[in-house]
């Protein structure tokens, strides 16, 4: 079956993709908010005290964050669906898929910030492992949604 056919089959199987997106929308938003408010925001404010308005709390910031989370949820879920269909849902493959998604999104993001001197090694040592855990759970949720529809 070709790729578009696979996606249609997954979507028609009880709304697999929609269910996976819903699960990941809840999980990823909770994870992002927790990581940001508990670790990243305080660490960034401490690391960059001379930068005015680091990690501000405003409507525009929350709107942009909402766009980021929406794109993240959809991208992670769709990539995970495609990869799980192609590779299978073994624990080893879930680990590989989660790690690939994590590296493609979060490692690039945080290395870019670090390279521009906008993140410290301490922030990376906290943010990156927590982001990997977020992706690992997200891929598990997609695998669960796919198993549930079979």
Image: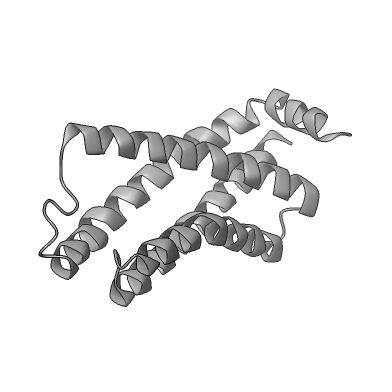
Q: Is residue 36 above or below residue 20?
A: below
Is 108 above or below relative to 59?
A: below
Relative side of 22 to 13, left or right: left
Furthest residue to the right?
Answer: 1
Total marks in image: 0
Name the residue rendered at 61%, 60% in the picture.
100
Task: Please tell me which residue lies in front, 59 or 148.
Answer: 59
At a point 16% along the width and 47% down the height, the residue shown is 56
Residue 95, by quadrant, is: bottom right
The image quadrant where one finds the C terminus is top right
Q: Which of 67 and 83 is in front in this view?
A: 67
Tell me the quarter of the image containing the N terminus: top right
Q: Which picture quadrant has residue 8? A: top right
Horizontal relation, residue 14 to residue 35: left or right: right
Q: Horizontal and vertical percent for residue 3?
A: 80, 35
Residue with the most extreme front position: 116
Quarter holding residue 110: bottom left
Name the side, left or right, on which 9 lies relative to 131.
Answer: right
Q: Where is residue 78 in the image (x, y as percent from the top left)?
A: 62, 39
Up-down: is 27 above or below 58?
Answer: below
The percent coordinates of residue 146 (x first, y second) are: 67, 40
**Residue at the location (66% across, 25% down)?**
14
The colour style of the image is: one colour
Q: What percent of the width, then of the height, locates residue 7? A: 73, 31
């Amino acid at each position: 079956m070709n790729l578009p056919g696979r996606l249609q089959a997954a979507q028609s199987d009880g709304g697999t993709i929609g269910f996976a997106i819903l699960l990941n929308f809840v999980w990823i938003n909770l994870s992002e908010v927790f990581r940001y408010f508990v670790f990243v925001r305080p660490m960034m404010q401490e690391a960059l005290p001379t930068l005015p308005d680091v990690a501000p709390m405003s409507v525009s910031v929350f709107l942009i964050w909402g766009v980021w989370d929406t794109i993240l949820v959809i991208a992670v879920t769709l990539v995970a669906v495609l990869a799980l269909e192609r590779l299978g849902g073994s624990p080893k493959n879930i680990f590989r898929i989660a790690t690939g998604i994590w590296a493609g999104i979060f490692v690039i993001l945080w290395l870019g910030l670090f390279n521009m001197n906008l993140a410290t090694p301490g922030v990376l040592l906290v943010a990156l492992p927590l982001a990997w855990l977020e992706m690992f759970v997200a891929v598990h949720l997609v695998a669960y949604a796919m198993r549930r529809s079979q």
